[in-house]
Amino acid sequence: MVIAIKAAAVAEVENFTNMEMSKITKWSKENKLHFNEKKSKVMLISRRRKERKAIDIYINNNHLEKVDKIKYLGIIVDSKFKFNENIKYITDRCTKLINALSKSSRINWGLKHGAVKTIYNGAILPQLLYPAPVWIEPIKKEWNKAKYVRVQRLSSLRIAKAYRTISHEALCILTGLTSINIKAEEVVTLYNITTGRKKQEYQADKAGNPRNWLHPEDIVGVNDTKDDGEEQWWHIFMDSSKNEQ
């Protein structure tokens, strides 16, 4: 059982909660159910830096332990709703999976980049984005965002089989992966649309294979005109293109 209490007058909270717990206990006895007191915890949700005192909540005449964080449905919820512990838990777990995967994916042997990318999309990414609508605001902070980017970077290095000195943006281009912070916002936006939380019209691009992307030369034409009306064209050379044309 998880009991989350919003901070208010402590005496009122204790009296109200204990009355409700007595009703729950009575209902459980009538329906031949039993709550495990050892697995039941109490968490006070408050934005205050200093709590005034501990809250005494009882079930079956047993005092329940007060905690600062609770793991519920795979999410670590803390009393401040910052989700720092949850983000750390997810990134640490995914990092261990990637390090275990790296033993089977080397530059010249092992899993090919296509197989590693499939594992990332099927096993790593769902864990990173579960459940994004809950912790989307905390991940916008730089220190939390850096943890997620670090995990995606480790996977991208295995997929591209590139050097560690390459930038994260270049890795996303080489692997065709969307940056994790953009992907998280995309998932949240889709969730808000499908659940009817937001009724605005959104324009979204469908993910495509990088091989099907148009070359910039075919999209944008850069030209200039001299004072005498003669057109002057610019030649743009892309670094590391490995193409004489």
Image: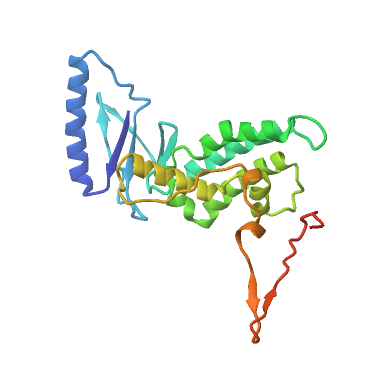
Q: Residue furthest top?
A: 32
Residue 17 sits above or below residue 9 on the image: above
Residue 102 in the image, given as x and y percentages of width and height: 72, 34
- The one nearer the camera, 93 or 45, is 93
How many numbered badges does the structure rendering display?
A: 0
**Left or right placement of residue 121 versus residue 70 in this view:** right
What residue is at 78 percent from the left and 57 percent from the top?
240
152 with respect to 25 (left or right):
right
Task: Examine the rendered structure and indicate whether residue 139 appears above or below residue 86.
Answer: below
Left or right, residue 217 beside residue 44? right
Q: Is residue 3 visible?
A: yes
Q: Residue 197 falls in which quadrant of the image?
A: top left
Q: Is residue 84 visible?
A: no
Residue drawn at x 33%, y 55% is 48
Q: Quadrant of the C terminus?
A: bottom right
Q: Is residue 134 above or below residue 39?
A: below
Q: Position of residue 75 (x, y in %)?
A: 43, 36
Name the side, left or right, on which 74 lies relative to 60.
right
